Amino acid sequence: MNRTPGSPTVFDPVQRTVLVTGATGFIGQTLVQALLDDGHRVIALTRDTQRAGRLFDGKVRPIAAMDALSADEQVDVIVNLAGSRILGQRWTARRREALRASRVGLTGAVVDWIARSRHKPRLLLSASAIGYYGIQAPGIDAQLTETAPPQPMFMSDLCREWEDAAAVATQHGVPVECMRFGLVLGRQGALPMMLLPIRLGLGGRLGSGRQWLSWIHVDDVIGGIAHRWRHAMTQPSSGASANATNFTAPEQVMQAAFSQAAARVWKRPCFLPTPAWPLRLALGEQADLLLEGQRVTPARLQREGFVFRYPDLAGALRSLR
């Protein structure tokens, strides 16, 4: 299916009832609007139900907890995007538990509702991240596909536990698609923070600058969700299974090249390096998110013929200027 910038996203020719968790987050807001534009009914799980009502002009049904849905509720598709922001506070024991609760715990609550529901959803699309693969030494060129294993470290363990919690839905006959997101580029999320030093003329490499950065435009996240949705709905039934898909662009770049590309788009200089040690001192293990990398390729999406609207970084950044 051809996908050009500005064209609507088609999820399903049949009107569906869709539960979206994390509906007021960066990706969630974009997804809910796309679902509404495609004619679907949306139930929005969010901690701030009043904000959800305002954001979507009263067109969604906001709920604050899964207990708000009865066992008789009919939900056709669940898109599970909930999860606290991972970059920021140091990963203390307390913070790690909060991150687990917002991902693994919330996903468990979704699956518990699936277990007691009388009308099982046809599909659970559940968020994960390329942190699943752990870290990749700077300059190592090996591309990671969906078959690459996790590593024994917190970010990898968190993603693995998150996916395992979602996979329990298969025991209740519901197919599960885990979406391993790379850095999602949009006008919200991490990009504005990343661009701040560049826009101030203070941009440059982080650490060695040779760490791989696997990214994806938010429009391609929404398109990829629709693609996996349609693919799952049209495949012959062979029992409920759990699959994983990398949500990254075909072009991966090193961090220094990312900064240089952004500086060109915003017409700013890019020459001030940031040493690794202050970041490691301030963030501890969390600094791995910035100083190490993963070169993750969207093998499954490409194999299935998914067409990216923004396959190259320069075009993606220009669209967000």
Image (cartoon, rainbow, N blue to C red):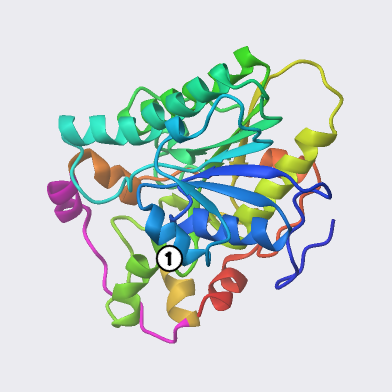
Q: Is residue 257 visible?
A: no
Camera-side residue of 210 and 170: 170
Looking at the image, residue 296 lies above or below residue 32: above
Q: Specify few, some or many for label 1: CA neighbours under 10 Å numbering under 14, 14-19, or 20 or more.
A: few
Is residue 270 highlighted in magenta?
yes
The quadrant in which the N terminus is found is: bottom right
| Residue 36, image x, y percentages | 66, 59
| Residue 181, image x, y percentages | 52, 45
Name which residue lies at 62% across and 73% down.
Answer: 315
- For label 1, the SS is loop
Looking at the image, residue 85 lies above or below residue 124: below
On the image, which quarter does residue 99 sit in? top left
| Residue 90, image x, y percentages | 18, 43
Query: In the shown orientation, is residue 109 left or right of residue 124?
Result: left
Camera-side residue of 312 and 169: 169
Report the span colored magenta. 266-283
Query: In the shown orientation, is residue 238 left or right of residue 317?
Result: right
The residue tagged 1 is: 188
Residue furthest to the bottom in view is 267
On the image, which quarter does residue 154 sit in? top left
Name which residue lies at 35% across and 22% down.
Answer: 152
Query: In the shown orientation, is residue 262 left or right of residue 3?
Result: left
What is the count of numbered marks? 1
| Residue 104, image x, y percentages | 40, 28
Q: Is residue 242 visible?
A: yes
Name which residue lies at 59% across and 22% down.
Answer: 117
Is residue 289 highlighted in magenta?
no
Q: Amino acid at mark 1?
A: Gln
Looking at the image, residue 21 lies above or below residue 307: above
